[in-house]
Image (cartoon, rainbow, N blue to C red):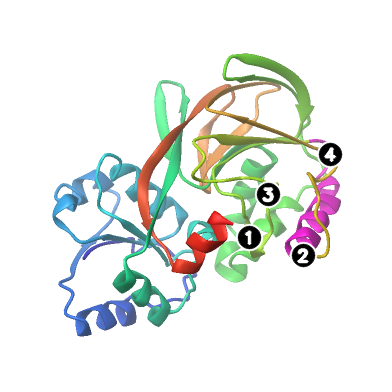
Amino acid sequence: MLVIRNPRSGQGMTPLDGFLHLLHEEDFGITVRYLHRNLRVQDLLYDASKYHAVIAAGGDGTVSSVAHALIGLDTPLLAYPAGTANLIAQNLGLVPSVQSLAQVVMDGETLTIDLAEIHMQDQTFGFTMVAGAGLDADMIRESEALKPNFGALAYFMGVFKNLRATEADLLLELDGVAVRTRGMSVLLANFGMVNFGIPIAPGIDPSDGLLSVVVVKGNTPLAIVPKLMDSFVSRMGLKTIPAPEGVEIYTCKTVRIQSDPPLPVQYDGELLDASTPLTARVIPHAVRFLVPARTLVRLNT
């Protein structure tokens, strides 16, 4: 096993050393390499094809960067939940216990999923979970100082720190088709679930070769409370909703987002020092993730 470990990831509640000890007891050979600022993740994965699997131990940013570096290889990846939110691991149905995660590795079940990337200002940024412009990027910025004390709850606290959001005129080019609308946030979702198991919107599939483009209407974070409640109620199985009110949902392979005024941008929880316009595209069936068997059953049904 090749382990890519990010020592800067915090708030993770699943001790990596105990997990590696279990694998060692099962006679897995283990190589650990540490991610730090002076190395690209690609430099740590130069021989990844020789390993049974790669384990990315960190937050969503770490897992996403490792996933993108594995594009074109058949080596499966485990999204080890060692960060604050660990949304990729949650979406894949991974239980945060060393015994469960070790069993996933030993079982070897995999799911091939899509990845995606943003292009802006002559740079490319790969993402796995979700990228966005507007309110969600503001949330990431406001939550940074709160995460050490509040963990994943800091993201929701960041949303409501400012009760006024920027509502922008939006021009979306979806596979070349222009759509004009208004909103305070545009989410580009590959996976469908955010913190605390709340679905972003119905029907998001990480293996369908498409991005879901979700426009959140309104000009105040308070406007998303009914949407969150509808999503939560739907998740609890109390009713089924086609989409929360005040949300527009599109699917496409490529999208270009222009806004007036420009909106801040984030991808997988990483805030960019840039704003719209941006272009994004899906990378279909890009990487194999190790998952529990129940995840395969859930997605197939």
Label located before the other in sequence (2 or 4): 2
Give above or below for 52 relative to 30.
above
Secondary structure of the magenta portion, mostly? helix
Label located before the other in sequence (2 or 1): 1
**Residue holding disc 3:** 200
**Residue holding disc 1:** 195
* 230 left or right, relative to 128: right
Tell me the mark number nearer the camera, choosing from 2 and 3. Answer: 2
Q: Which label is found at residue 237?
A: 2
In whole angstroms, how far apart are the C-alphas of marks 2 and 1? 18 Å
Range covered by the magenta-colored residues:
217-235
Q: Secondary structure at mark 3?
A: loop
Q: Residue at x 71, y 59 (%)?
A: 157
Q: Residue at x 55, y 56 (%)?
A: 299
Residue 219, x across and y down, in percent:
83, 37
Residues at discs 2 and 4 in contact (Cβ within 8 Å): no
Query: Residue 235 sits in which quadrant?
Result: bottom right
Q: Quadrant of the C terminus?
A: bottom right
